[in-house]
Image: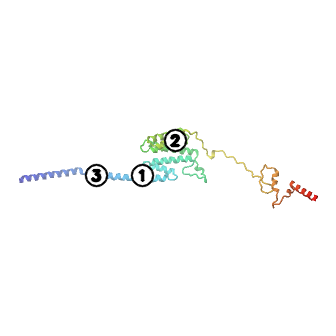
Amino acid sequence: MDERIRELKEGAGREESRINEEFIEFLNKWSTPVLVVLAALAVAYWGWNKYKALQIAKVNEATSAYTSAVRGNPNPDTLANIAEEFSSVRSFGHLARLDLADTYLLSVERGLMPGVEFDPANPPSEADVLDEQMRQTFLERAASLYRQVYEATNSVRGKEPLAIEAAFGLAAVAESRGDIEGAKRHIEDAKRLAEKMQYTALAMIAENRLQTLNNVGPVPALYDAANLPPLPEPEPIEPPATDESGSGIEVPADAPDDASSAGEQTSDDGGVDPAAENQPGDEGSAEQSRESDGGG
């Protein structure tokens, strides 16, 4: 009995020793790769969190820069820099390009350089007024920016509103150039996208613009002051005629000559003018008085 118990104990000890050896062998074989994997996972986790923090910081920076750029009177150079610097940050690059194109288009509509405010009290200088060459240059820049945004967003899910706005912008450029048919094609593109995404309000706006363009006639040419003929000189205005007697009474030029003598019937002190004593009514009264005296 004791011998059997001793054999069991020895067998258990040998089994335990074998397990320990296998475990030590396992650790020797796999401990380094496992540690490397765990370390890689830890580094990857840290890197992902760092990347997310950098992305959030970039979005915040883009938001601040874009908000400041579009406030008040946008500067084209600032918008161009934002479009380039934040082109890969969400949709800030597209938004900056749309605003930059709007700035060029508004400049063409006003006939003034970007950033110049019209003040009736202080007319703009010649350098601030767009000539025809600069007008066409700005229209081409606006069309290029609108087209770039449209091509980059019209087939991207969730960015259809940007494509619709770009299509409206291309239509406005075409209309400014007098290309009514081209404007209709861009409006139809905007309407198609709006109906596809079930943007009912935008689809109605597009339909109304199409109806308006169908009734648009030839665009009249606009000329600057340098291309207009000089205005005729106004005719001089003669002062009204006055009484030559100095009474200050205005007498029409076609009035008869005896009209000016009407002011001479009374003297300046309110007495009777001597010429008025010889009136017919006064002579008759004097004759009747003499007859009465003779009869007495």
Mark 3 vs mark 2: in front: 2
Distance from disc 2 to disc 1, alpha carbons, whole Å, reads: 37 Å
Q: Is residue 282 above or below residue 169?
A: below
Q: Position of residue 148 (x, y in %)?
A: 47, 43
Tell me which label, 1 or 3, sits earlier in the chain.
3
Q: Residue furthest bottom?
A: 269
In this figure, which residue is indicated by the disc labeled 1? 59
Q: Position of residue 162 (x, y in %)?
A: 46, 45
Q: Position of residue 97 (x, y in %)?
A: 48, 47
Residue at point 10% right, 52% down?
8
Q: CA distance from mark 3 to mark 2?
A: 63 Å
Relative placement, left or right, of 274 versus 157 is right
Residues under numbered marks 3 and 2 in contact, where contact means CB atoms less than 8 Å apart: no
What's under tag 3, amino acid-wise?
Leu
Q: Give the foreground label among 1 and 3.
A: 1
- Please give the label number shown on residue 208: 2
Report the coloring of the rendering: rainbow
| Numbered disc 1: secondary structure | helix
Judged by depth in the image, the label closer to the viewer, 2 or 1, is 2
Instruction: Answer with the quarter of the image where residue 177 lies.
Output: top right
Q: Which residue is mark 3?
A: 38
Q: Of label 3 and label 2, which has the lower sequence position?
A: 3
The structure residue drawn at horizontal position 28% and vertical position 51%, both measured from the top left corner, is 38
Residue situated in front as seen by the camera: 254 or 19: 254
Q: Indicate the secondary structure of the residue bearing disc 2.
A: helix
Q: Position of residue 160 (x, y in %)?
A: 44, 43
